[in-house]
Amino acid sequence: MINVLLFEDNKNDVAQLKASLPKNEFEIVGISNNLKDGVQQINQLDFDIAIIDIFIGDNPEGIEFANEINNSTKQKPFIFLTSSIEQDIFKNAKNTQPFNYLIKPFNKFELLFSIELAIEKFAEQHGAFAEKKTVFCNDCFFVKKNNSLVKITFDQIFYVTVDGQYCKMITESGNFILQISLTQMLKDLPPEKFIKTHRNYVVNLNMVDSIFPNDNLLILKNKDKVLLSRRLQSDFFSKYRIFK
């Protein structure tokens, strides 16, 4: 799920945003209609993107809310959503470096496309979704599957294996074919959590259930079997404390 934080005081717009974001892809984790509550949610909630109305009542509090995100310890992409077309307001909003700027009224497809662009821009991977590439952000990645944008955290991955010229990623949320080499995939995954066990496999260390070194085999928590080559066994076992 892609976690969304809303800063909006118009109930009709909140309802439209909820209706526009597919429930199988997005979860609205917080809604605030004042700056005090909004700042508290920035610090307390786990969100991937914020959608911000510039005006709360008659005051452009959304600009200050955006600055709070920029100054927080966990910077995230945000989109402005506003009915204001005033030049001064636009200039002040632009100074916060938003990842997109939408004018009300908006439509569903415009909003979803803006979210995709914002995630790409935040990850500095422009055009990745159009090219069916994976977008990595901090402790997760985003992938386009059919017309849906799917978020997968690193902890959800069981393993990655070679599939022709691409990679096949096995996760708790399903399987994904990614246009990326296994070598590059290993570089993008955190080394403290993932290790190469065979020339065709990269495994999440936390997903290993049983080890059979004499058979060059690992059993993962999803019951899949993965090869453990003899050449890579010493590197693999260095990640564990073995009791004999």
Image (cartoon, grey):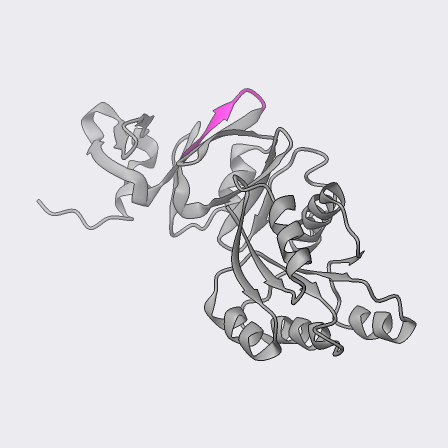
Q: Which residues are magenta?
A: 159-165
Count every numbered label the image shows and give the total. 0
Q: Residue furthest front?
A: 12
**Residue lying at 57% horizontally and 32% vertically, measured from the top left:** 181
Classify residue 237 as left or right of residue 192: left
- The majority secondary structure of the magenta stretch comes to strand
Q: Is residue 65 magenta?
A: no
Q: Residue furthest left?
A: 244
Classify residue 104 as left or right of residue 78: right
In the image, is residue 165 above or below residue 84? above
Residue nearest the observer in this picture, 225 or 149: 149
Looking at the figure, which quarter contains the C terminus? top left
Q: Position of residue 123 (x, y in %)?
A: 64, 53
**Residue lying at 64% horizontally and 72% vertically, measured from the top left:** 70
Q: Residue furthest top?
A: 164
Residue nearest the observer in this picture, 157 or 187: 157
In the image, is residue 108 above or below residue 226? below
Residue nearest the observer in this picture, 226 or 77: 77
Q: Position of residue 54 (x, y in %)?
A: 74, 69
In the image, is residue 194 above or below residue 84? above
Q: Position of residue 59 (x, y in %)?
A: 74, 79
Q: Quadrant of residue 14?
A: bottom right
Classify residue 188 as left or right of residue 244: right
Q: Quadrant of residue 108?
A: top right
**Residue lying at 20% horizontally and 29% vertically, measured from the top left:** 212
Classify residue 219 as left or right of residue 58: left
Q: Residue furthest right?
A: 87
Q: Position of residue 137 (x, y in %)?
A: 57, 52
In the image, is residue 174 above or below residue 61? above
